[in-house]
Image: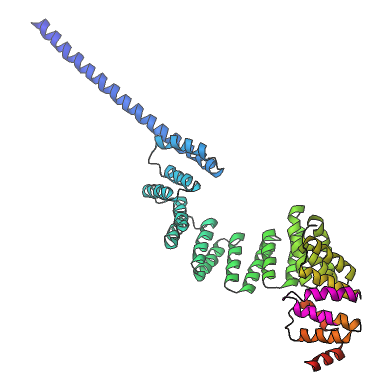
Amino acid sequence: MERLRYFSGMAVLLAGLYLLCGCSQMAHSQKKQQMVKTWEKTTAQAKLTTVRGLIDRGQMDEAKKVLSECMQADPDNPEGLFLIARVHLAEGRIETAHRYLEKSLALNEQQDEAWFAMGLVYQQQNHYEQAQVGVLKALELQPAKVDYILALVHLYTIQDQLDQAQRLLEEKQKLLPYEMELTMALADLMQRKSRPQEAIRLYKEAIYKQGANPRLLESLGVCYVSHQQWDQAADVFEKLLHTQKNDSMQEPVIGWLAFCSLQAGRYGKALTYYDQLSVSRRDDPQVWLEMGQAALGAESPERAVYCGQKALRLQPDWTDAEVVVGCGLYMQKSYSPAVEMFRKICQNPKWEAFGWWMAGRCYQQLGQNALARSAFEKAAHLEPKSPMLQKFMNEFDPTVADKAGKTL
């Protein structure tokens, strides 16, 4: 009886030990599974940095592959959902991107990039007020992010909220006084508000702080050009030229310099710059036309005729070039070919008054007074608009003008 009781107790003890071992093994297995999941999530989070780089480089197929692995390990990762939205945005699936952004922000509202992307999505859908909300949220999270500031300024501007844009830029300029992009945006805004002198002041202050920055110099020069301040523009573009070491970057600056010098009446300098420009743009009729105009101003008629004829070979029947040739011939005292050119010019309404006036001067020099008088009568009934006309009007013989006036 005792032995039976002994064996019964041993059976119960062994069963208990078996159960204890089974529970221990189950707990260990669960712990191991949890550790694997934690490791996979940690690895997935680390891989998201790689995904960002792939998206930035436009390697979308590889990005999607890695992203899929990450999301399998951690399907509720807010950053992962945001990156999926980025892929959809890059591939033009706006609505799908919108849904993933909403999921991402529902899990974590502290993602400035996701709010900014949401703002861009709404902007593409022309929902500007909602776009502002998204970009404002991003800016609240990252108050010094220049991209966010400029995006909000753009949203204000396209809705004609120029005062709000100005206040934002001025506030951020105090926070970031050396951020060139903010200065340029504020200067551009001042031009939109018809305050060019304020824009010029901003550019000058920025150049004083940052030195001869090429982008600032170019913007200031273009600002002067837009307001026809040719002397100032030419001075700025000369400074800009000295900052450009690459020949390909110098060419557009030389083009601006040549044009501004021509408009400012600096004809000698203009010719120098057009000479340089004609090497790389020898087949551009505009370059030859403007070089011819500069030659007229510099009182170099032979060169003016050559340049005008070169422009006409490249662009036949171009009246502006014919004007240059005609004026050059007149200055050379080649009155007969000049009058033929001016008679042709009279057929263009833009140059009609000038053409008749110059034809009259040629007839006058040829001693054909009746034809001169008739030409002057026609010119007198038309409103002269050409700046070049004024140059020759100053040389007109008053006695012929009197005779022409009496016949009207």
Tell me residue 267's x, y (percent): 83, 70
Q: Is residue 55 left or right of residue 382?
A: left
Tell me residue 188's x, y (percent): 60, 67
| Image vertical order of residue 137 relative to residue 50, above or below | below
Please give the range of residues in magenta: 334-360
Q: Is residue 46 visible?
A: no
132 drawn magenta: no
Please give the count of numbered marks on the rendered protein: 0
Which residue, as the protein is rendered here, is positioned at the far bottom? 406
343 drawn magenta: yes
Q: Residue 174: name its quadrant.
A: bottom right
Q: Is residue 316 visible?
A: yes
Q: Residue 384: name its quadrant.
A: bottom right
Q: In the depicted view, which residue is nearer to us: 351 or 285?
A: 351
Q: Is residue 20 left or right of residue 45?
A: left
Instruction: Say which quadrant the C terminus sits in.
Output: bottom right
- Main secondary-structure element of the magenta-colored stretch: helix
Tell me residue 307's x, y (percent): 84, 65
Which residue, as the protein is rendered here, is positioned at the far front? 370
